[in-house]
Amino acid sequence: MKFARLLVTVLLVLAAPAATLAAQEHGTAVAADSAQGVVPQATEAQTQNVDIITPHITDANAIDLPCLNAGFVCEVELPRWTVNVGGHIVDLSPTKHVVMLLVAALLCCAVLITAARAHERHTHAIGRPKGFAAGIEAMVLYIRNEVAVPNLGPHGEKYAPFILTLFFFILFANLLGLIPYGSTATGNVSVTLTLALVTFVVVELAGIRSQGIGYLNTIFYWNKDLPLLMRIIMFVVMTPVEIVGKLTKPFALTIRLFANMTAGHIVVLALIGLIFLFKSYVIGLAPALMATAIMLLELFVAFLQAYIFAMLSAVFIGQIREVHH
């Protein structure tokens, strides 16, 4: 939404000279029409909102809630919070995606804590979990034993809770965008960048803990097996490469999750938009069926992207720890 406003502003600035002349001519025409008692009518382009995609994939200072109006949607403005820091106004207002992240975190805690308590209760009662707790246990054990532990390297079990937290948090954030009145926070590049930066910090701290002073070798290339002259040359050439290699990891995590979650919603909304564009039940049937199929695919993608983010995070931690072991 902010990008759309910026784009409109740029277009208005570029079109300022022509707009000024047109406004003068339009003002003259309106004055003449008003003098004759003619009320100007809005054009079709002015009355029809053709952008149904951008508001659904961008952040906003309002959230959609169910209500009993014509569209069954009420837009509720979120509170505005600003603070003055050194003479600069800093906007700390919650946005739609911030609300979705909080909801995802609460759902994640509620589901996993409830499942853990049910698991303990069932184990004491019949010796094994059952129902919902058994399903959550299967997911947890799969991510831990098949994704986290094999990729984290020797004695890497202590990082498994972090990988599990990433998986379930991203999964709930992805799924919230597939329900009515929801929004995909992971379709916001700021959200995915923050998740990637948190993972980057954990990866580097894991390297420091495992290698100690040897961690510097992951930044500054210094091959002791080469002659001194070649060692210096390779140091100058390869050190920037090592630094860029570190930065590409969070970049890959950021773009992969953001692009995959955004692309699916754009396709679904574009197909739904065809229904309103053609205004025909016959022609609209095909886009409706295609949108339904894409939504089912998006359900799979929600799980897949959470899995890939967790797996890559485990791989990066295991790689930087591997030198020490």
Image (cartoon, rainbow, N blue to C red):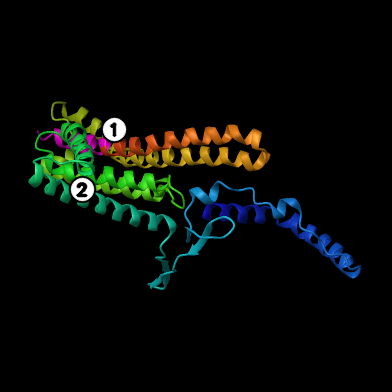
Indicate the secondary structure of the residue bearing disc 2.
Answer: helix
Residue 210, which numbered label?
none
Residue 5 shown left or right of residue 169 in the figure = right
Q: On screen, 69 above or below 85?
A: above
Q: On screen, 23 above or below 305?
A: below
Instruction: State the residue lying farthest toward the right.
Output: 36
For disc 2, the marked residue is: 115
Which residue occupies the foreground of this view, 235 or 123? 123
Which residue occupies the foreground of this view, 6 or 143? 143
Q: Answer whether residue 322 is magenta in the image.
A: yes
Which secondary structure dominates the residues rendered in magenta? helix
Q: Residue at x 29, y 47 (%)?
A: 169
Residue 235 shown left or right of residue 7 in the figure = left
Of circles 1 and 2, the one toward us is 2
Indicate the secondary structure of the residue bearing disc 1.
Answer: helix
Q: Amino acid under label 1?
A: Val
Q: Amino acid under label 2?
A: Ala
Label 1 crowd (10 A; few <14 / some 14-19 / many >=20): few
Question: Which image quadrant is residue 23 in?
Answer: bottom right
> Which residues lie in the magenta part?
311-325
For disc 1, the marked residue is: 237
Q: Residue at x 44, y 51 (%)?
A: 182
How many circles with numbers are drawn on the protein? 2
User: Mark 1 or mark 2: which comes first in sequence?
Assistant: 2
C-alpha gap between disc 1 and disc 2 = 52 Å
Q: Answer whether residue 219 is magenta in the image.
A: no
Residue 29 shown left or right of residue 111 in the figure = right
Please indicate, yes or no, whether residue 213 appears anywhere in the rendered image. Answer: no
Give the x, y percent position of residue 82.
42, 70
Q: Residue at x 25, y 31 (%)?
A: 233
